[in-house]
Amino acid sequence: MPYRTIIEPFRIHSVQAIDLTDRATRQAALERAGYNLFGLRAEEVTIDLLTDSGTGAMSAQQWAGMMLGDESYAGSRSFYRFEDTVQTITGLAEVIPTHQGRAAERILFTTMVSAGDVVPNNTHFDTTRANVEFQGAEARDLVIAAGLDPALLHPFKGNMDVDALVATIEEVGVDRVPLVMVTVTNNSGGGQPVSMANLRAVRAVCDRYGIPFFLDACRFAENSWFIKIREEGYADKTPREIALEMFSLADGCTMSAKKDGMSNIGGFLAMNDPNLALKCRNLLILTEGFPTYGGLAGYDLEAIAQGLNEALEENYLQYRIRSTEYLAEKVSSAGLPIVLPAGGHAVYLDAAALLPHIPASRYPAQALAVELYLDGGVRGVEIGSVMFGKPQPDGSEVPASMELVRLAVPRRTYTQSHIDYVGEVMIDVAERAGEIRGLRITEQAPWLRHFTARFEPV
Ligand code: F0G
């Protein structure tokens, strides 16, 4: 077949201007923000790859759906459309809307997890880890060894180490493992997919011990596409069929609709156990809202229902995964160390490899993220020892297992020339990597410190 560019399967319908800042403005912005990119204002950023969460463009069909929003407090038509869509895609019976993914996590963990418990996951996302720890429990990451080696090629680097899962259950005792979670795709581990075979193996372990199994399903559609193109036996299945099979292996899921829900806000908790659902709904009413809106407007429920279906379209997924891979190929062929293969929603630069002169205690990935912003107005996010380092009583820190800068691509938002520009900035910065200096923390919060910490160059 002749080679043709995989094009964006949409055309632009409404545009938003981008501010083109100069270096002096960016330097001043960094000083004001304490070298924390979460402290920047949108107009100070040229290409915003901080996150793919809630930052994508909605389709004309989603906007049209919003006009159909039924704002009834109880029994909204939009809720039933949303519930029906989630049930059809996941096969899960009980559907509980929440304002975003972490609200679903908090409700699930408050209901299921007690102090002293251990919750295994391939790799907990930051809010997931924090919500487990907030219950006094331990969040244990059990990704396969290949998942911790950025340069190693493996089709399913998000897989859980099933032997380590069994060993954990045997070590702590089945009574202290209230649930097992697997994150698809594995965001904190490089946006890497999990294979169906691995999900099946985790299910078998959970069955053996009688432990519920939940998916952190934020990027379930992207994971389905990776299974289709990489796992034997799935090439002829549709992403929808693959997604249904993935969910059929789980007892429930948490979901941020800000990712593969293609919406700017929203999420849900879904499960099969009606008794667990009852407890979760009681908690939902306390903090999120009545079970037929759960902290969302009726029009949000419409946008999510439509978005979930669009996320499973083959043309969209082929473009989506290719557009991330395109950036990865561009920088990787220029010699930059990144997590390989490319993740679904993001390219992850390996700051430990690029900046070997900066020790983990001086936050190489934060320093690199700051430099990408200073050089070209590109905002990424640190996924390293600022996010996951563990401060010790003596003032030292146990570093994170990897020092990564994530450049997350919002869905349907930037064009190929934006991405070419990002690649150029990355390559320019890498050329003078030796000049980049580390950072020290001057202020930090007791948990999720990466959102608000302040730094200064050393
Ligand atoms: N789980 C995963 C795997 C996530 O990536 C996120 C959010 C959440 C849970 C929480 O969902 O934000 O709707 O409350 N990830 C975003 C990110 C913030 O940038 O990766 P939320």
Image (spheres, rainbow, N blue to C red):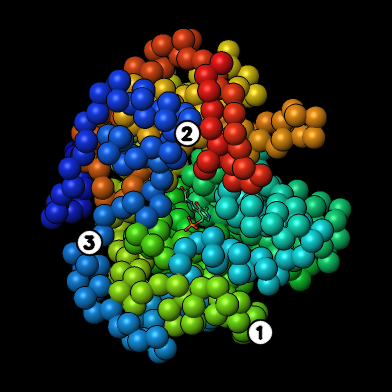
Dot 3 crowding, Cα within 10 Å, few <14, some 14–19, many 20+: some
Disc 1 element: helix
* Callout in the foreground (2, 3): 2
Q: Which of 26 and 66 is in front in this view?
A: 26
Q: Name the residue under label 1.
A: 275
Q: Residue furthest toward the bottom? A: 75
Q: Name the residue under label 2.
A: 36
341 sits to left or right of 443: left
Residue labelled 3 has its Cβ within 8 Å of some atom of ligand 1:
no
First-in-chain label (1 vs 3) = 3
Q: Which of 443 and 379 is in front in this view?
A: 443
How many marks on residues?
3
First-in-chain label (2 vs 3) = 2
Tell me where residue 365 appears, x and y as whole percent.
52, 28
Q: Nearer the viewer, residue 369 or 343?
A: 369
Dot 1 crowding, Cα within 10 Å, few <14, some 14–19, many 20+: few
Is there a contact, CB below 8 Å, between mark 2 and mark 1? no
83 sits to left or right of 393: left
Q: Name the residue under label 3.
A: 59
* Callout in the foreground (2, 1): 2
Q: What residue type is labelled 2?
A: Asn
At horizontal 64% and vertical 46% (from top left) the residue drawn is 447
Residue 236 visible? The answer is no
266 sits to left or right of 444: left
Up-down relation of residue 67 to residue 435 (above or below): below
Q: What residue type is labelled 1?
A: Asn
Disc 2 element: loop
